[in-house]
Amino acid sequence: METLEQIRDRLLARFPGAEVTLVTNPGAAAQHSLSLGLAHAAAMALFLRDDAELKLDYCSNVTGVDWPEKEIIESTKVSVPDPAGGPAKIVEQKTKRIQPGSLEVVYHLYSMAKKHGPVIIRLRTANRTDRANVPSLTPVWRSCEFQEREVFDLFGVKFDGHPDLRRILMWDEFTAHPMRKDYVEPDDYEWEPTPHGTVLDKAKAHYPPSALVAAAPAAPAHGAPTHAAPAPKEAPKP
Amino acid sequence: MTGLLIIALVTLVPAAVAMALRNVIHSALLLILSWAGIAAFYFWAGAEFLAFSQVLVYVGAISMVVLFAVLLTRHTRTDGGVAPDTLGRALAGLLIGGAVLGVLFGAVLSTPLPIGSKPAAAVTVHGLGVELMERHTIALLVVGVLLTVALLGAVVLAASDSRSGPEDAR
Amino acid sequence: MNAMPGIFAAATGADSLLERWPILFRDTVAGFFPAPLQWLVGSLISILAIVAIFGGVFAALTLLERKMLGRVQNRPGPNRTGPFGLLQPIADGIKMLTKEDIVPRSADHLLHFLAPVALLAFSILTFAVIPFGRNLVPLELDAAVLYFFAAGAATELAIFMAGWASRNKFSLLAAMRALAQLISYELPLLLSFVPIIMLAGTLSMTGIIDQQAGWNFGFIPKWYIFTPWGFAAFAIFLVAALAESNRSPFDLPEAESELIAGHLTEYSGFKYALFFMAEYFGMIALSGMAITLFLGGWRAPLPFLEFIPSYLWFGAKLLGLLLLFIWIRGTFPRLRMDQLTRLAWKFLVPLALFNLGTAAFWSLTSGWSGPLQLARWGVAIALVVVPFVLLGRGLSRGVAPRTYRFA
Amino acid sequence: MSNSGLEFPAPVGGSHVAAVHDPFHGDLLEVSMGPHHPSTHGVFRMMVTLDGETIVKLKPVFGYLHRNHEKLGENTSYLASMPYTDRLDYLNSMTNNWAYALAVEKLAGQPVPERAEYLRVILAELTRLLNHVCLAGFLLQDTGASGTPLMYAFREREKILDLFESLSGSRMMCNYQRFGGCRVDASPEWLAGAKHITDNFGRFLDEYEELITGNEILMARTQGVGALSPELAISAGITGPMLRATGVDYDLRKVDAYGVYSRFNFRVPLGDHGDTYDRYMIRVLEMRESITILQQALRDLPAGPIMDPKAKIRGFRPKAGEAYGRIEGPKGEIGFYLISDGSPNPYRYRVRPPSFVNLTVLEDMCLGQTIADAVIILGSVDIVLGEVDR
Amino acid sequence: MILTPLHLCLLLSSALFCIGLIGALSRSSSILVLLGVELMLNAANLNFIAFWRYGPNPAAGTGVLFVLFSIAVAAAEAAVGLALVIAIYRHQRSIRLQDARRLKG
Amino acid sequence: MLGSGLLQGLKVTAKNIAGSFHDPERLVTVEYPEQKTKLPENYRNFPFLVSENATDPMGTLRCVACQICEKECPPQCIYIEKSKDKKPDAAGKMQVYPAVFDIDTSVCMSCQICVEVCPFEAIKMDQVFEIATTDRFNALLLDRNQLAKPNSYYHQIHPTEAAEVDGRLLAERKAAEEKAKAAAAAAAAKAAAAAAAPKPVATPTATAGAPGAVAATVSVAKPATPPAAAPVSATPPAAAPAASPAQNAPASDGKAAP
């Protein structure tokens, strides 16, 4: 199989103006990947599928990754000339930078015809809120149909051109996206004696006291656990 | 005599109710009861074989076909509401039917009917068979042909254009 | 109004006491009543006897079926209630009786209630003409065979009522299936025994059994199953009877893997038990019919075994057929609806018609003897086997074992 | 696919759009098969639209068993996810364990001793027997065979489960594989037991096939039912026996040759029709191949440690990076995709469940078939809802 | 005058006939119309049996045979009639007689 | 010919009917409450706490409330509170013990992770399975008293494994004693002034990474006092041993974590 660099170069040659970045994987697996620009993604995916060399006819795995917005503290070493005229001092300068969050969809492609792979491609949304769109690759690989629905359901990535973009695992009325890193789980636990005070406290906070009394058939074995409950988190996003 | 009255009750009431009901399935089921009453009449009259044939054909076969037809034509617009001309039709039907009933009753009651000296002896199956094969062979053959043609015709009619499965073939 | 025919014909003096005691018992008990009531009391005793005996057979059969299915599947079967699980039917009965009777709110309440009752009533009615032993015919009718199938035809109607009244989509599908199945299998069922009637020349059960009296070569009974056409007719009858009594592999109306329980989905408690009972009664009645038509009725299979009372022979044959039904149920997968109807129309009906011809040939050549007898058998067997093979080939077109390749 | 109103850009071989549009909508019967239905293999639901008994539309609905397995995986350590993988496809915990261990080993660059690799092959092939024999039983149960084939299948399955129990301590939730090896070594008695079962399994298969494979009713019920074209199968990412029944030669044991599979001599059976009968038969034939693999593996099992000495149980923190590891599970390709940020918990933990992806074509296979066929088609897809819903 | 059993039978059959007639005339569902016709046919059969049984010269089984043929014809009629209903339903999506105005499919 | 497959099937089932009466290979079920299958030695169901002494199970628990299992437990069904005081353990060393040790068996999935991560061989898998109860909540929440079972019971249910564990523990204890002795001797030799024997400080038990041992790849030194800020959730388990040597008594020469 061609290396990812070769594939990237061919893609760039075939689609001038397209963005294709090689994302290296520092881990032991060394499964590097190609990050495709959204504008040409569908066409490039089609090319990958139909190209005689590659024949990546089998999309095995589609998944989302949430990269929330995070603060990056970069320290750069700057040599500051000593005003006193001595040798220049090396001073660490810390700059805070906010890396914008995004959602990423990762496709693992293989070839059944040529029995090679994987070629990993990644599509990255512009942000995590209003522009969380990527083009759907379901028209290229049918196997993306359910998996993209799942990514939509759990991450909230909207797939443009998906034929049937509905929730798949969560129920239709559910509004949040549980696989996002900032998802806050609901605290409406079923009230029952548990050694975990945190759960109990959350449940107590959620329900009015009267409901708890009605729902509690028996007291826990050893009284209220003395576990310190963490500060109550905010309610789940609507 | 009481037997006949009971049979008349079992036959007429379900038939009348069936013709008045809106639910076609109920009508069909009531008519089955009515047909069973007629079979009872045959039995009462000493035509055993006929009674069983009546049950077998009407209760066993025709009612099934009727119910099947009702189920196949489940969603019809008749379910929606009463058609505007229903009342008129019903009235006309009742009027004509009533008139015919009156005429028939009058005719029956006013005619002195000759009654045989003794009721006919019940026929045995064997006797019927002999009759059928000897005196009424032509009729038997004609009926056989008729049934075959009807079966084929029903198959052709009911089998739809595209998916003529065996389940349609009755 | 002509009186109902005698419930039991009078016992002949030639039979042993063991053979005659049921009738003697009835006559003795009826003798205590004034003469105008005697026939009524006699009939009531017969009815009670039938309901009690076959109720017991039903109870035993539920256990037997579960035991035997267990053995087929390498399990011991129910064995917790009583010794060897013998009290299991009673436990089941108590459970069924104490269960809540649930009727869906939108169901057609009257029909929903009537369906199991009607089903049970009709299946008990079919017992009226079956000869359970020598002279043990509850109702001696001239057209008994016709009566039997007239009463039997109404059972599927009850299934339709159950399915339709439940207002459940699965039940409705089951109702449709029950109707289609009835329409398809009534014909082969009736056609299968037409040769018997043709050769026996009577529609009376006793008459048919009488025709099967005697032995060939002194030990092969002259039952109809021991003729080529009789065997074919028996096979067709068996298949059609399986379908008529909704037994596996034709249990499509209640196909549990597709329609949950079909027409039984919305039934519980006692009504469900009634359905169950009626289904088994139907199976017993059809087996009794098969015994009468093909297996010589209550006759002993070998001359020297005739001292055993006839009703025991009937019981033994019944048990054998029921075990065969259970065995079949434990082995086969279920057919699909269209295959079921295709089997009836494209296979069983033509086969039964051919068989009619074979029987006619058999009847015409009844005078052949010696080497001609051999030719008669040969031709008759060919007349049975060749259509079977040809029609079978047509039926199983496109269905064959496959070979596989390896990468 | 008419919900969104978008026209479906037909992929290769996609008959998906052909969802029949019937102008006479009054005639159709919409039936909700499941979640409480005897033949949906768990809490699975099919919204079926019927014309008579013919299916004109079928929408699978799932998620009733959804417990956000992937989120759990992100909130627990690498090791603590291992028992959770048992519960994905609860029939095949051994292969799930292996797939997960393989992915983590790829992520951390963790070698595995040879004996452990052999043990993994033995257990995976036993699992394959287990799964396929169960499927054969369930499929026959779906066709209405009163439980007899199912009971025969379960009798054999019990024997394998007993093996698993005596090795790992649990029949179904084995939790056996570890990153860098296996948890418990197999004793000689255990290996003898495994050999005994392997040797006898062929006899059982003969009897089973005699019971049912030549059965005309089964053939009539399954041949030509739910046929799947190879093009659509490839496009839809179908894997496992279901793919090979369409005639596509793609078996990860050969393609990836993970573990020590390259050392074994076995064949990959392929079907020509892609229908339910082929899917059933491919599994039966695969069982026979599994027996030969097992015999070779049990014969060649080397001595040695079963755990890499450098492997860590506590405090396992792989370097930052990502890895996708996949193996040929009995139901198809089961893969785990992991992203590590160097912490004890994975940053992203993703399961690629074969049952879930294989369900993609359920509607395509069922359209135009009857409701009775839908049941056996679903049965032949071989799903486990623990894995579909995760 | 006295009501002989024959009179009673004839009254029964004429009542049944009229019920069938009213049904056939007033109902709009073609299946029910067909059923009404069946009832009328049955009423006629009743007459055959009544006259066979009570009539002056009961030739052996003639009435019975007549009814037998009539039942056969009725079966054929029902089969063809219902097949027609289904055929009409296929075209018109209705079994109401008023809707079946076009004979051409 | 049509029907041959069906007849073959009937033949197989007939064979099975007959076989089920005489062939134990076929009829494989057992009559459960009366008969029971023999549990394999490796069978595991629900954890229990090992105590050294059968007569006083509470006093001789091996558990030192290090809370590693609580952290590693996938379904989070273990709840531990450390004691404020210390008790001597089997080796006579003063140890913290669990004041509260609860396992919610309605949540526990018998995965054995707690056993694997325990550095003290203190929690092992039980073999109970007849645990049906009418009280869904309290009866399934097992406390310290219900969980404690003597080592002899462990030997009874897992003989091979228990013998191996005991041998390992004995070897470790011996090694630790010898080392302590050597250290003490060295200390005595070095600081000749100190005539008194070293006071019985808590010698850290170190589970040596015996080859083949499953659970012992990280040696954990038990701190004499609980760390001031016990890592609650964020710190991985490996962090605890890494941090603990610093707080150990000077006599400690426990192996550093690898």
Image (cartoon, grey):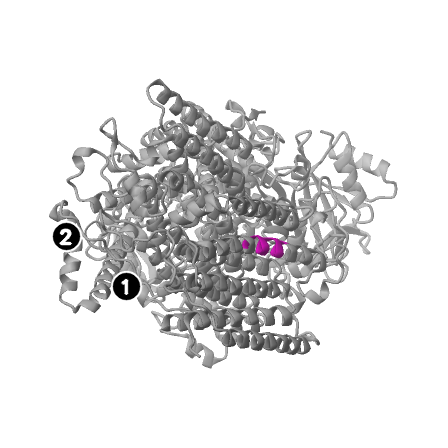
The residue wearing badge 1 is: C94
What's drawn in magenta, residue-wise?
A: E75-83
Mark whose residue sits in front, 1 or 2: 2
Q: How many C-alpha atoms fall within 10 Å of the one at disc 1: few (<14), some, or many (≥20)?
A: few
- D309 magenta-colored: no
Give amino acid for label 2.
Answer: Trp
Query: Residue C76, image x and y in percent?
Result: 27, 44
Residues under numbered marks 1 and 2 in contact, where contact means CB atoms less than 8 Å apart: no
Q: Nearer the viewer, residue F193 or D266?
A: D266
Q: Is residue C268 visible in this depiction of the protein?
A: no
Give amino acid for label 1.
Answer: Ile
Query: Residue B12, image x and y in percent?
Result: 48, 72
* Farthest left residue in view: C17
Looking at the rendering, which quadrant does residue D6 occupy? bottom right
Relative to residue E45, is residue F7 drawn left or right?
left
Q: Main secondary structure of the magenta part?
A: helix
Q: Nearer the viewer, residue F212 or F198?
A: F212
Q: Is residue C54 visible in this depiction of the protein?
A: yes
Q: How many C-alpha atoms fall within 10 Å of the one at disc 2: few (<14), some, or many (≥20)?
A: few
Q: Nearer the viewer, residue C138 or A54?
A: C138
Query: Residue F178, image x and y in percent?
Result: 30, 41
Is D373 located above or below residue B114 in the figure? Answer: above
Query: Residue C66, image x and y in percent?
Result: 31, 48
